[in-house]
Image: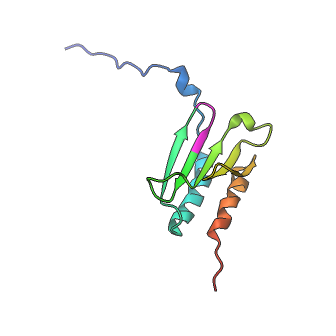
Amino acid sequence: MTIQMPTPFPQNAQSSEQISFDRREFSVILSLYGRMVAAGEWRDYGISCLRDMAVFSVFRRTAEFPLYRIEKRPKLRAKQGMYAVVGMDGQILRRGHDLAAVLRVLDSKLIKAVE
């Protein structure tokens, strides 16, 4: 019987080029997502890690277009801010440097008047 050393996964240059959310950003996003799910507004989400941006998409139902997209584009860090909330129609609802401040535009959707 011979013992073989395990072969490591190949280092792919493409995987290091992907943009993704870090733990702190996920914490802020999932906190809002949890409140919206509890309110019955959102039901599903999807995450995409691409070369130039990371996207957290929010769905009312799985088979629909996303209601909102939370985007992280590090190339825009010095200009308009790397975080953006994009509506279903592609309109940018808010853009900025602070993720929590950008997500407040969606927090207002949670507040409803009680008669």
Q: Which residues are magenta?
A: 51-55
Which residue shows up at 49% across the image and 20% down it? 11
Q: Is residue 94 above or below residue 114?
A: above
Q: Position of residue 23 (x, y in %)?
A: 58, 45
In this view, which residue lies farthest toward the bottom?
Answer: 115
Which residue shows up at 35% across the image and 20% down it? 6
Left or right: residue 31 versus residue 91 is: left
In this view, which residue lies farthest toward the right?
Answer: 79
Q: Nearer the viewer, residue 93 or 111?
A: 93
Q: Nearer the viewer, residue 30 or 23?
A: 30
* Number of marks present in the image shown: 0
Q: Nearer the viewer, residue 98 or 81?
A: 81
Q: Is residue 101 visible?
A: yes
Q: Is residue 100 magenta?
A: no
Q: Position of residue 68 (x, y in %)?
A: 60, 53
Which residue shows up at 58% across the image and 38% down it? 20
Which residue shows up at 73% across the image and 55% down it? 101
Image quadrant in which you'd find residue 8: top left
In this view, which residue lies farthest toward the top?
Answer: 2
Q: Main secondary structure of the magenta part?
A: loop
Coloring scheme of the render? rainbow
Quadrant position of the N terminus in the picture: top left
In this view, which residue lies farthest toward the front?
Answer: 89
Image quadrant in which you'd find residue 111: bottom right
Q: Is residue 53 magenta?
A: yes
Q: Is residue 21 visible?
A: no
Q: Position of residue 87 (x, y in %)?
A: 64, 53
Quadrant position of the C terminus in the picture: bottom right
Q: Position of residue 92 (x, y in %)?
A: 70, 50
